[in-house]
Structure formats: C-alpha cells, structure tokens
Amino acid sequence: MKKILPPNTALIPVNAELAFKGRIFDVYQWPQTMFDGSVKTFEMIKRPDTVQVIVVRQSKILLVEDEQPGRTPRIHFPGGRVDPEDKSWEVAAKRELREETGLICKKWKLIDVSQPIIKAEWFIPIFLATEIIDELPQQLDVDGEKITPLWRDFTKIREDVLSGKEQTMRYLVPFFNRIKSLDDLLAQTAFEGKEIEC
C-alpha cells in the first residue's frame, strides 16, 4: 500500500525486530548508537492506520456517536482501522463510511495526514467526501458497536475541538487551527507529502 506521509515522520527502522505481536499493537526494538558511542535499545509500537472522513452536506458536517462494549460513547468523524485487505487508505475510508453511516460519496480527497504519537508508526489520514450519491442501511458489527450519525455545523465542531470539549477529537487541534471555516475546508487542496510503499 502506498502512503503519503507528513514531514518529520518517525518510522520503525529496517533493522528493528518484532519483540511482541498483539492483536492491534506490535512492539519493535532495535539497537541505537548514542552520541557518546554507547548502544541502547530503542522501541516503537506499530498499529494499523486509522482513516477519518469529513462528509459535507450543504452547510453540515457528519459526525458519529460511537458506543462499544466496555467504553463510554464518543463522538468523532466516521472512520476506523485500515484492514489488511484494504488496497489503499481511500478504499478503507469508503468502506468505513459505508459501514458506519450507509453513505456513498462521489468526490474524495485526501486533505491531511497526521502521526499523533511520535513513538508509534500509526497514521491518521483525513479524507474530505462530498456529493452524497446514495444512502444505504448501516453495516455495523451488531454485537460490538452502536453508531448514530449526527449532522452538525462546522463552526460548532471546530469550537468544541479547540475548547477541549470533544476530548476524543483532540488530535484534530492542529487541523482546526489551520481550517477556520467551512469554506476553508472545501477549498483544501490534496495533501502533499513523502510517498512510501508499505
């Protein structure tokens, strides 16, 4: 899979060895030579990337209220984990949007990619999706999630993220510091970064 990554991205070095394989998180370790010539063991985790989709319909933005077993409900943009069979981030984003909301959109654009934790090889690509062409039933994991679509004003979402009210979306503070209005969002050009093959 090709990925377009932001500047100063931290990746697990090629000489790292898998120390622990989990269901979601893998731990890698490698010997790192220090400035004084000594060698220490460095470590990073790796997990599947998480796609997020910002759907715009007229002046509204789509959020979802997501409830899963053992966790309090949280509000966020539609999206989720990139699966091994997904051929690209965009394929994963379209699948997640369809599963969580039933929506199918015609226009898609990658507008942002972040690495929220520098010690984790984990990326959050954000797609802008417009022109809804179909609204189908949700395809939820019936025993593991309850998802309710919520349409909100851009200004309210931005205020809630920047004020800290929406704690589950705090990783979006840099994004909303840059994007100040719905017009700014719609005018975003495609994200540019370093392309790598994973």
Image: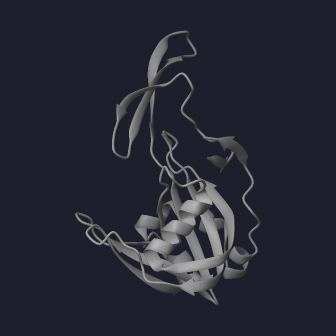
The x and y percentages for residue 175 are 61, 64
Q: Is residue 113 visible?
A: yes
Residue 6 versus residue 12 in the image, above or below:
below
User: Residue 155, located in which quarter of the rendered image?
Assistant: bottom right
| Apparent side of residue 161 relative to residue 178 in the rendered image (left or right) | left
Q: What residue is rendered at 44% in x and 30% in y? A: 28
Question: Percent position (x, y) of residue 3?
Answer: 64, 48
Q: Residue furthest front?
A: 85
Above or below: residue 137 compared with residue 174 = below
Q: Residue 186, position in %: x, y?
A: 72, 77
The answer to whether residue 22 is left or right of residue 173 is: left
Give residue 22's quadrant in the image: top left
Residue at the (42%, 79%) spot, across then down: 138
Relative depth, front residue between 24 and 87? 87
- The answer to whether residue 21 is above or below residue 67 is above
**Residue beneath the point at 50% across and 74% down:** 98
Does the image show residue 77? no
Front residue of 73/176: it is: 73
| Rendering coords of residue 45 (x, y %) | 44, 38
